[in-house]
Amino acid sequence: MNDFRTAGHAAVDLLADYLGKLPEGPVWQAMDPAARERLLTLPLPKDGRGLDELVADIGTEVLPYPMGNGHPRFFGWVNAAPAPAGVLATLAAAAMNPSSAGGDHADVHLERTVVRWIAELAGFPHPPGAGLLTSGASMATIVALGSARNRAARLLGVDVREEGVAALPPLVGYVSAETHSCVRKAAELLGLGGRNLRAVRTDAAGHLDPAALRAQVAADRAAGLHPFLAVASAGTVNTGAVDDIAAIADVCADEGLWLHVDGAYGAFGLLDPLSAHRYAGLDRADSLALDPHKWLGVPVDCGCVLVRDPAELRGSFSLVPSYLRDENAGGLGWFSEYGIEQTRPFRSLKVWATIAASGRDGIARDVAHCTAMARRLGELVDAATDLELLAPVETSITAFRYAAEGVSEELLNRVNQALPVAIQQRGRTFATGTVLDGREALRACLINPAVAEDDLAVLVEEARTVGADLLSNQA
Ligand SMILES: *Cc1c(COP(=O)(O)O)cnc(C)c1O
């Protein structure tokens, strides 16, 4: 173990230097072609090497080429900087290397606790067993929608686990154009058919329209279909919009639909007192998907699915006959009876460490700081005559575009389409693009609590300078 100790100390020094120096370097840079080639063509080694050499290789061949998301001026997609406590916990979790499928060991009990903590942070009811950690929100969504499908089937008298989806009458679910693609992916995998997810109209700010949902459900019922599911977004990826969950929950209650809330990015936004009102009704959902590996900064991977009724999960995924169930853990059985994975990683330690390092109040402060910075960025955009805010800032995503006066929409679209990558390549900051209402847009997602006003100023400056450059090149 001496090798491990010596190399381990070197590794921690290396990582402390890496994390400490991140803010000084470029946010992202294209890989040096030779370094890229070296990684791509590494031959399978015949003989082994010492741990100290491997640590040195990590330092020279890997760490210099990050994605960029550890940097305070990284605003791309929804990718967090890793919480240092979570990084350390990852090492300890790997050292124990359990399978958190079930049993009586620390990781299993810790997962029960952190799932309860996550539920408490999100203000979601949590009877024991009503959730588990997953690889991400995509997996959480498959688990949630699988349970929704199976409940709908049961109510129609079909045992879909035994008979398969061919035995089902046509089930339809409701989403909006802003719903994340993982919902469709789950519907496809579950045999529901992507076209049976109806996109309900949204308002101008991208919120699913509850009245349109009600009308669509009535029309589909009249056509002989079986509405069973509605998906609300608690923070869309494009603009951070939070649907009117309470109004959607009313429709679901009246119509007997399973309400799934996608809070992968945005659910923890409710910890900001200024934003909390937007999340009214979240606690009425049948299932909630969230991503501790986003706003909480838990190192990837870590998603979480919470459900109202634990029996729906166990009834959907357990293949353990009841007489064989391990009732050791308070009758809850194994996590592998509640989801898809059998051998499961020790995710809970990094969640525990990340939450414990900040406490509830620290997390709430960080979330509130991010939403305040996103609103501030909105103000800076508003104040710049050549930039245009494209959506209200509801959580911590600010969507805007370069829009010099007197330039045609067509030309603006060309400029804004090229803008994100052009900004990324300069390395001062990093934002990604999207399309809103047919308009090419830049979106900045602020989930790193280290972000400061100066960082926002750099983004605004880059958008203006690079936008003007692109315009003059296009014109
Ligand atoms: C990231 C995200 C997802 C997908 O989650 P993964 O963790 O990437 O699987 C789904 N919905 C929203 C709103 C997201 O931001």
Image (tube, rainbow, N blue to C red):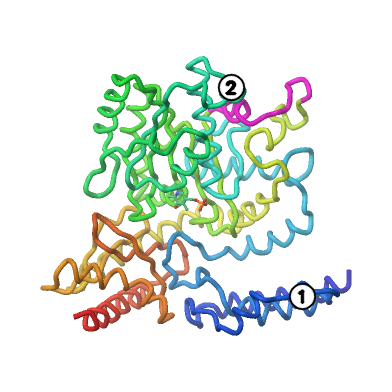
- 34 falls in the magenta region: no
- The yes-or-no answer for disc 1 within 8 Å of ligand 1 is no
Looking at the image, which residue is at 54% across and 79% down?
A: 31
Quarter of the view holding residue 9: bottom right
Mark 2 and mark 1: Cα distance apart in space = 56 Å
Left or right of 350, for residue 70: left
Left or right of 113, for residue 206: left
Extreme right residue here? 1
Q: Amino acid at mark 1?
A: His
Main secondary-structure element of the magenta-colored stretch: helix
Looking at the image, which residue is at 23% across and 79% down?
A: 474
Mark number displayed over residue 109: none
Split into 4 quadrants, where in the image is the C terminus?
Answer: bottom left
Residue beneath label 2, please? 163
- Crowd class of label 1 (few under 14; some 14 to 19; many from 20; radius 10 Å): few
**431 over 94 or under it: above or below:** below
Instruction: Indicate which disc, 2 or 1, sits on the residue closer to the N terminus.
Output: 1
Q: Position of residue 197 (x, y in %)?
A: 38, 36
Q: Position of residue 221 (x, y in %)?
A: 32, 21
| Depth check, front residue: 295 or 438 | 438
Question: Element at badge 1?
Answer: helix
Residue beneath label 1, please? 9
| Depth check, front residue: 426 or 92 | 426
- 323 falls in the magenta region: yes
Left or right of 55, for residue 406: left
Over which residues does the magenta segment extend?
309-324
